[in-house]
Image: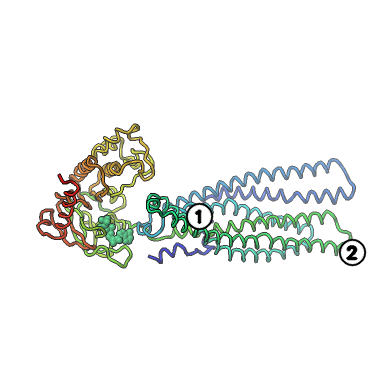
Amino acid sequence: MKDRHAYLLEPLKQSLVFKRLLAYAKPHWKWLTVAFILLVGGTGAEILGPILVKIFIDDYLTQGIFDTQPLVLLAAGYLGLHFSAAIMNYAQLLMFQKVALGIIQELRIDVFKKVEKLGLSFFDQFPAGGLVSRITNDTEQVKELYVSVMAVFVQNIVFLIGVFIAMFYLNVQLALFCLFILPFLVVIMQLYRKFSSRYYAEMSEKLSQLNARLNESIQGMAIIQVFRQERRMNREFQEINQKHHEAWYKSIKLDGLLLRPAVDVISILALVMVLSYFGIVSLNSPVEIGVLYAFVNYLDRFFEPVNQMMQRLSIFQQALISAGRVFRLMDHDELAPGKTGTDSPGISRGVVEFKDVTFSYDGKQDVLKNISFKVKEGGTLALVGHTGSGKSSIINLLMRFYTPGKGEILIDGHSLTTFEDKELREKTGLVLQDPFLFFGDIRHNIKLYDDRISEADVIDAARFVHADSFIDRMPQGYDSPVGERGSTFSSGQRQLLSFARTMAKKPKILILDEATASVDTETETEIQKALEKMRLGRTTIAIAHRLSTIKDADHILVLHQGEIVERGTHDSLLKEEGLYHKMYLLQQGVQKLENPL
Ligand SMILES: Nc1ncnc2c1ncn2[C@@H]1O[C@H](COP(=O)(O)OP(=O)(O)OP(=O)(O)O)[C@@H](O)[C@H]1O
């Protein structure tokens, strides 16, 4: 398990990451082509500018020729070039941004889809905040690759090629000289990439940890305040922040050293070289001032894109690291157990059977050992046992959240692994101890956006579980807003809404984790009445904490440390005078103490 977690932190090979990122750009090739054409057009227009100035200086200014017509033409050409460059650059920028945003949207959706397919065992280990960080922060960084890196790189490379062509046109020897600068720049870039990737990986991971810590703190704020954990949380938060800051600082130092100053030094050396060249040439023959102007200008223009690319290199590097983290998550193979085989049976009767099932969460310690039982169509099975005895684990296996290590689970005689997800989820209704409500309104929390569930079905389901009385009392009725996780509802109301949601899909098998939360007697009665109705005619498997609620169950399994230690009906188990009997007496005693009359 630890290895799987470590796998997510391992950096991916950058060339592979880059290839995969390019694959995302492929479907947008039409827009990209237009953008590139505009880019080349705009850049070409910018490059031609100095050539017109050179013609003006050498052919007109220094010769003292001031003919109106050619000069007006030159001026108009110069202005026209700049104007069209501005329009083309604006259009290409918009197109690149549009493509970039589209790509990121797809990437985010893909990664989210993948996360939805991961098994619960993945979520047991990976902190939620860290996951959020990968889906939001990391994809955001990738966006920068398309928005501010790719276009700038392509634009500047086109620009550089243009500058070189112009330089060669003006003076081949000097242009060749300038070509020698390129290998130095490549070396600086490689050095930078090597060191910065390490710091960026650290930074992203620390940011991820910060999010994980924040998420945990916000979720558990009540407990933090009650147990006065603020100082400890603060200290731990500060520590991660400090590490994030250190990684950031290291990368800033590296940026400061390699990105600008190193390039500046090379640019000054190049300028000295060009000026010396013209100085030496001027000793033997006159120098054309226009060529000198154009050359110095081009040299300046040569280093401008180089500097721009260097500045973007840090974003490029961050984007590659972040994309690697996103792809690692997308490649994760700890998927939710799904269907195997070719036949797709249906669930018509709801007969549930466990055959000698053994299971472990961590592959080391068995939490369920040789569990066997069968629940007949419409029958009720109750699972009882002390905390940690394995009741919820049985339900987790039946819901196909995890795969058993040994043994087989059957529904209607077919292995659990053969059912399509749709069939399994539609025919089994799960009600959890702590019901989860979605942000939205009551109607959609019952309907869950299933078009097959009509308005009348929603109301029927609510009425069936007696949730209608409190819904009708609310001013907005079924349109009443529901806060995140249903925080604006009482636990009894949340239970009833989750019952209604389950009943709206009319399941064949009902799986209940009985609520332990105390609710008032009236709500408790409502809940019990609702449960009784829900169980009628359905196969039911229920975890029971209050033994009084399962007196009429057909079959009761008593679990102890992952094993079935007793089985039978309420009466037969009481007669056995074993663990069940003890638990029952204990609960009776507590009830008497709570309710002496
Ligand atoms: N997601 C998990 N990952 C690892 N171990 C787990 C996980 N869930 C439960 N366990 C372990 O499995 C054992 C059985 O837990 P389970 O939740 O099935 O007990 P339970 O009988 O339902 O308890 P309770 O009545 O308190 O809900 C426990 O020892 C628990 O520590």
Residue 560 placement: quadrant: bottom left
Tell me: 163 left or right of 207: right
Residue 413 placement: quadrant: bottom left
Tell me the SS state at disc 2.
helix
- Mark identifier at residue 284: 2
Q: Position of residue 455 (x, y in %)?
A: 31, 35
Tell me: 543 left or right of 479: left
Quadrant in which the N terminus is drawn: bottom left
User: To which residue does mark 1 refer?
Assistant: 138
Sequence-first disc among 2 and 1: 1
The type of colouring in the image is: rainbow
Residue at image coords 55%, 49%: 100
Q: Identify whether 72 is placed above or below 550.
A: above
Amino acid type assigned to the residue bearing label 1 in the image: Asp
Q: How far apart are marks 2 and 1 (CA)?
A: 60 Å
Quadrant in which the C terminus is drawn: top left
